[in-house]
Image (cartoon, rainbow, N blue to C red):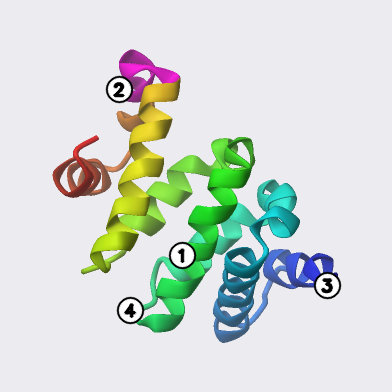
Amino acid sequence: MFIGQLITIINRPNTPKTLLENTAITIGRLGFVCPQDVAPFLHQFARQWCLSLRNIRDNEEKDGAFRGMCLMISVNPAGIIQDFIFFCDAVASWSNPKQDLKEMFQKILTGFKTQVGTESWTRFSDQFPAALKERITQIYGV
């Protein structure tokens, strides 16, 4: 499998923005098709993946990539914990996700909140910039 090469590209300093975006989309699509194979590597690329895709407009490529990320998180939730704030920020970057994708986001966010408990979630979400906290609370109810 060539996930290692994609991880190297996405984490390399000074990688051109379009290459980062395309690499993140490719990783997401691989995660959609074979989440069990890609999810174990989640901790190696999650932060840069989220940063790479947070600024692109809503489109089918972004949709497919995020569906893959959600499947990878469901297979390996521990792989996103360290960079969960970046995932929250990437989720908040969506203007209008399709309803089923929005539900996937909500399930992950609610699951994380339930797992850590309300008090820990409050401490965690208090670290968010105000706009991010407001958006996540308003749209996803967490």
Q: How much space separates mark 3 and mark 1, taking CA atoms?
A: 20 Å
Occupied quadrant, residue 130: top left
Q: Do the numbered discs 3 and 4 sit on residues whose CB atoms are within 8 Å?
A: no
Residue where numbered disc 2 is placed: 122
* Residue 97 visible, this orientation: yes
Which residue does the image show at 41% across and 42% down from the upper left? Answer: 108
Precedes in sequence: disc 1 or disc 2: 1
Q: How much space separates mark 1 and mark 4, taking CA atoms?
A: 13 Å
Q: How much space separates mark 2 and mark 4, taking CA atoms?
A: 29 Å
> Of residues 136 and 128, which is closer to you in this image?
136
Precedes in sequence: disc 2 or disc 4: 4
Q: Is residue 125 above or below residue 6?
A: above
Residue 27: x and y in percent read 64, 69
Q: Secondary structure at mark 4?
A: loop
Give, as a single range, the part of the protein colored magenta: 116-123
Magenta stretch, main secondary structure, is helix
Which residue does the image show at 46% across and 49% down from the upper left? Answer: 86
Any mark on residue 66, and which? Answer: 1
Q: Secondary structure at mark 1?
A: helix
Q: Could you tell me the amino acid type at mark 1?
A: Phe
Question: Which of label 2 and label 3 is nearer to you?
Answer: 3
Any mark on residue 2, and which? Answer: 3
Q: Do the numbered discs 3 and 1 sit on residues whose CB atoms are within 8 Å?
A: no
Residue where numbered disc 4 is placed: 57
Q: How much space separates mark 3 and mark 4, taking CA atoms?
A: 27 Å
Q: Could you tell me the amino acid type at mark 3?
A: Phe
Question: Which of label 3 and label 4 is nearer to you?
Answer: 3
